[in-house]
Image (spheres, helix red, strand yellow):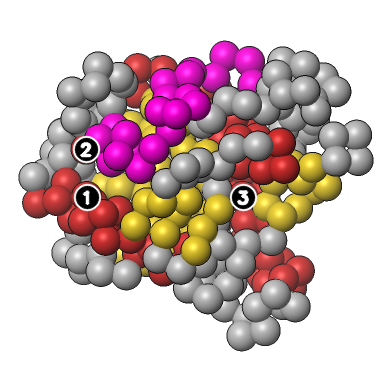
Amino acid sequence: MSGKKWILLVAGSKGWANYQHQANVCCLYQIIKQHGIPDEQIVVMMYDDIANNKENPTKGSIISVLNDTNVYSGVPKDYTGENVTPDNFLAALQGDDSTGKKVIKSGAHDNIYIYMSGLGTEGTFEFPEQSLRKADFVGAINNMSQKEKFSKMVIFMSSSFSGSMFEGLSDSVNVFGLTSSEKHTQTCPSDYNEKRRVFLSDKFSSACLDFIHRADFKTASFHTLISVKQANYLKQNIHLNPAGRGPCKFGNMEISHCHLSEFLQK
């Protein structure tokens, strides 16, 4: 039985200097929308202080790392400002609509894709004012699996030390996770924009966005993305990570062979 596809996009930071995180989320939203996923099945969390920031030379816009186009237009404002919190993230993910806001109402036959871009420390993904701890993050996923709230789940997390966030994930859950960094390494920003004096993305997200933007969703898989981008990523970032392992994979590796269309296309 075929179920719905649910998307959760999270920019965990605030402030002009962290432009890249909201830009990544907005860019990915626009790609997914082009492939037919309705807004009713997409939840977006971002502080929303970039597009109309006083530092922005082009008010009302956030620029894509892919082609310098405005990717802010039309992005849902499901959670903004002080509502961008770990508690609201966990509630949205698990379908708790007690706050009256949009949440993921997934069931046993549904697939979920999560993308998170932000700052991190070892064992945390940072939100603007609070930290999401790995125990709460992994606990929520394991709990959802036990309650059969999804069929398969894919998580991309772009933050420093993000490899630490999947420790404790049960081997039995149908989840595939890909992180920008190992447990002890940082994420590298990329695509510096002189006009705005900010980075538009990070090397992990930029590579992923470029692949997803160009891919045939019916034939390309997450495994293809990793195979195509991994060697180049490692070559560019060997000075940051001398061990040479680059992005880290977690969970059920069979799910990495799923086509993008199983998660990101109507």
Do labels 1 and 2 touch, CB within 8 Å? yes
Quarter-of-image position of residue 210: top right
* Mark 1 or 3: the one toward you: 1
Quarter-of-image position of residue 13: top right
User: Which part of the image, by quadrant, shows the C terminus?
Assistant: top left
* Image coords of residue 257 (percent x, y): 40, 57
Can residue 226 be seen? no
Cα–Cα gap, marks 3 and 2 = 25 Å
Quickly name the residue at label 2: 94
Q: Residue at x 24, y 22 (%)?
A: 99
Q: Is residue 191 left or right of residue 62?
A: right
* Start-end of magenta stretch: 71-93
Can residue 232 be seen? yes
Quickly name the residue at label 3: 205
- Who is closer to the viewer here, 198 or 15? 15
Closer to the chain start, of discs 3 and 2, is 2
